[in-house]
Image: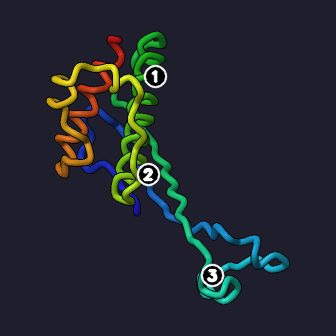
């Protein structure tokens, strides 16, 4: 899937693409041969092989105004941190959808019972915007401790 910015504004160029590739997890079962298609993989593993996905994102970002070096380093750090946070949210969302239970922190046991009752479980909220807002609030609280 390709994407591109329509109207230049704060960004001079913003373009890139997403690509999904299959990962054959149990590829070692087919050892002398390497399956190239899904049908080859299913025939080799007897229909019991696991399949994963590799997501590749390539993007080009070019701001309209290039900031001076100290500022550009700061902005690069913010961009990297935001991207990392977004990917962590994506991994947590995948775990939530799959139904993987998260291990509760031991610090939650030390909280007073009144605070624990007032907190909402992230898995109970189905609106993504509310979940992200709750995660941000919780991460800010954990940073202060």
Q: Quadrant of residue 29?
A: bottom right
Cα distance between the residues tagged 1 and 3: 40 Å
Give the label, 2 or 1, closer to the camera: 1
Give the label, 3 or 2, closer to the camera: 3
The residue lying toward the viewer, choosing from 14 and 46, is 46
Q: Which label is found at residue 37?
A: 3
- Residue bearing the label numbered 2: 16
Using the image, determine if residue 47 lies above or below residue 103. Answer: below
Residue 114, position in %: x, y?
A: 16, 23
Cα distance between the residues tagged 2 and 1: 20 Å
Q: Residues within 10 Å of mark 1 (few under 14, many from 20)?
A: few
Residue 124, position in %: x, y?
A: 20, 48
Q: Return the disc, 2 or 1, that comes first in the chain's sequence.
A: 2
Q: Is residue 115 found left or right of 144 in the rendered image?
A: left
> Which image quarter is the C terminus in?
top left
Using the image, determine if residue 73 lies above or below residue 34. Answer: above
Q: Which label is found at residue 4?
A: none
The residue lying toward the viewer, choosing from 17 and 125, is 125
Q: Is residue 52 found left or right of 97 in the rendered image?
A: right
Q: Residues within 10 Å of mark 2 (few under 14, many from 20)?
A: some
Q: Residue at x 60, y 66 (%)?
A: 23
Image color mode: rainbow
Cα distance between the residues tagged 3 and 2: 26 Å
The residue lying toward the viewer, choosing from 20 and 123, is 123
- Residue bearing the label numbered 1: 77
Q: Helix, strand, or loop for circle 3?
A: loop
Using the image, determine if residue 121 lies above or below residue 64. Answer: below
Q: Return the disc, 3 or 2, that comes first in the chain's sequence.
A: 2
Residue 127, position in %: x, y?
A: 17, 49
Point out the residue furthest to the right here.
Answer: 32
């Amino acid at each position: 899937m390709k994407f591109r910015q329509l109207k230049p504004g704060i960004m001079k160029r913003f373009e890139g693409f997403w690509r999904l590739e299959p990962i054959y997890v149990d590829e070692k079962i087919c050892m002398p041969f390497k399956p190239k298609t899904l049908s080859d993989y299913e025939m080799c593993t007897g229909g019991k092989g696991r399949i994963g996905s590799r997501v590749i994102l390539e993007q080009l970002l070019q701001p309209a105004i290039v900031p001076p070096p100290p500022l550009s380093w700061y902005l690069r750090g913010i961009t990297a941190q935001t991207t990392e946070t977004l990917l962590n949210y994506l991994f947590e969302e995948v775990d939530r959808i799959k139904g993987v239970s998260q291990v509760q922190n031991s610090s939650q046991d030390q909280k007073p019972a009144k605070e624990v009752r007032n907190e909402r479980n992230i898995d109970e909220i189905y609106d993504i915007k509310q979940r992200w807002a709750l995660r941000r609030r919780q991460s800010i609280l954990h940073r202060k401790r």
